[in-house]
Amino acid sequence: VQLEESGGGLVQAGESLRLSCFASVTTFRIYDMGWYRQVPGKQRELVATISRSGDTKYADSVKGRFTISRDNANNAVYLQMESLKPDDTAVYYCWTFRVQNYWGQGTQVTVSS
């Protein structure tokens, strides 16, 4: 399983970004997918997950601002981030699990105040 993220960048507080992740698997629809983030010196933390059936979960810190979605036809999962805050600054990682955890290489999101 290979995961490739894109869409990070530098934005100002209050602005939006959309992250994309494409998975190199043959049966994408059976994978639960998610986004995590990490800042230097801290543990990687869950941002949002979406199950194979489309059920979503969010960290309390992003509820109401971030939306995770998936496109099974294109092996893709997205994270739409609205009303970004400086505390959202982190490297964002795409995640999935099949026997073991798989991670993308990460994409940097920087939110300036």
Image: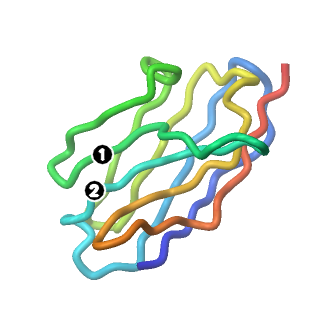
Q: Is residue 70 above or below residue 97?
A: above
Residue at point 45%, 20% (across, down)? 60
CA distance separating discs 2 and 1: 6 Å
Q: Quadrant of residue 52?
A: bottom left
Residue at point 50%, 57% (across, down)? 94
Residue positioned most to the left: 53
Q: Is residue 41 above or below residue 24?
A: above
Residue at point 84%, 26% (across, down)? 112
Residue 45 in percent (x, y) is at: 54, 40
Is residue 20 toward the left or the right of residue 34 in the image?
right
Badge 2 crowding class, 10 Å Cα cut-off, few under 14, some 14 to 19, many 20 or more, is: some
Q: Which mark is residue 79?
A: none
Residue at point 39%, 30% (across, down)? 58
In what quadrant of the picture does the N terminus appear?
Answer: bottom left
Q: Nearer the viewer, residue 74 or 22?
A: 22
Residue picked out by circle 2: 32
Query: Element under label 1?
Result: strand
Q: Quadrant of residue 5?
A: bottom right
Q: Would you say the residues marked 2 and 1 are in contact, meaning their CB atoms lie under 8 Å apart?
A: yes
Q: Which mark is residue 50?
A: 1
Q: Nearer the viewer, residue 81 or 86?
A: 86
Q: Is residue 68 above or below residue 106?
A: above
Is residue 36 toward the left or the right of residue 49 in the image?
right
In what quadrant of the picture does the C terminus appear?
Answer: top right
Query: Element under label 2?
Result: loop
Residue 34 in percent (x, y) is at: 40, 50
Residue 49 in percent (x, y) is at: 36, 43
Badge 1 crowding class, 10 Å Cα cut-off, few under 14, some 14 to 19, many 20 or more, is: many
Identified by mark 2, the residue type is Asp
Identified by mark 1, the residue type is Ile
Residue 38 in percent (x, y) is at: 66, 45
